[in-house]
Image: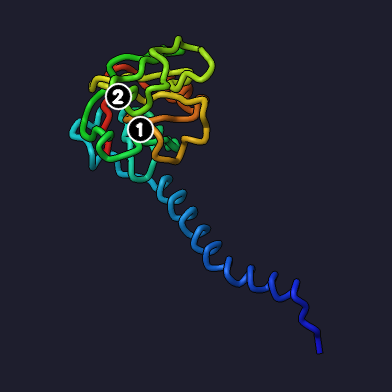
Amino acid sequence: MTKTTRRTFLTATAATLATPSLLRANTNTVQRNSSGFMAQRWQDHFTALDRVTVLCDTNARALHYWNPEDGDYRIYPTSVPQTDELTKRGLTSIVRKKHNPSWTPTANMRERDPSLPISMEGGEAGNPLGTRAMYLGWPAYLIHGTHDTRKIGRRSSSGCIGLFNYMVEELFEITPVGTQVRVL
């Protein structure tokens, strides 16, 4: 017969109490990560099917890229707006592209966080737009890179769609100005 010590009892109790939380945390992570990389039928979201298309799925936190000419289909993990109020949804297009974009926070961003700088030059350390930006037809909405890799997969932006810098650089090269974009 084994003798139960106080240390054994406390360790067993802590493990028993922690088990449901650990299982629940693991389940939530798997569900969120797997949903972000489910294939989408891009044709269901656009009327013009003859051009490069980008679908930003804010629920799945994923950007889908399609080129119908060569059948190229890619999925990128993204950051998405912090709240639904900051999320602009609908059909737009890429109207401009920029290497090492400068950043000027909007008045609403500065109201929420007065410590933000007035602006930052492109290439400057900490610039939240990263190394590339693709400007959408809506003012102040972009698809851009980020140096803060903790933001990807989270509700962390002030309205934009963010990608890892190396991924936005790849997307930037294959996505022409005029590309149709739908944000869900």
Compared across the picture, whether 84 is left or right of 153 comes to left
x and y, in percent, of residue 57 in the image: 33, 40
Q: Counting other residues with Cα less than 10 Å from the Cα at mark 2, is it few (<14), some (14-19), or many (20 or more)?
A: some
Say which quarter of the image contains residue 41.
Answer: top left
x and y, in percent, of residue 104 in the image: 36, 15
Query: How many labels sit on residues?
Result: 2
In the orientation shown, which residue stands out farthest toward the top? 121
Quarter of the image with the C terminus is: top left
What residue would you read off at disc 2?
A: 141
Q: Is residue 105 above or below residue 38?
A: above
x and y, in percent, of residue 162 in the image: 41, 30
Compared across the picture, whether 42 is left or right of 174 comes to left
Say which quarter of the image contains residue 68.
Answer: top left
What residue would you read off at disc 1?
A: 66
Q: Counting other residues with Cα less than 10 Å from the Cα at mark 1, is it few (<14), some (14-19), or many (20 or more)?
A: many
Quarter of the image with the N terminus is: bottom right
Residue nearest the observer in this picture, 25 or 69 = 25
Q: Residue at x 18, y 34 (%)?
A: 47
Q: Is residue 121 above or below residue 115?
A: above
> N-terminal of the two: label 1 or label 2?
1
Q: Nearer the viewer, mark 1 or mark 2?
A: 2
Circle 2: residue type: Tyr
The residues tagged by marks 1 and 2 sit, at their Cα atoms, a distance apart of 21 Å
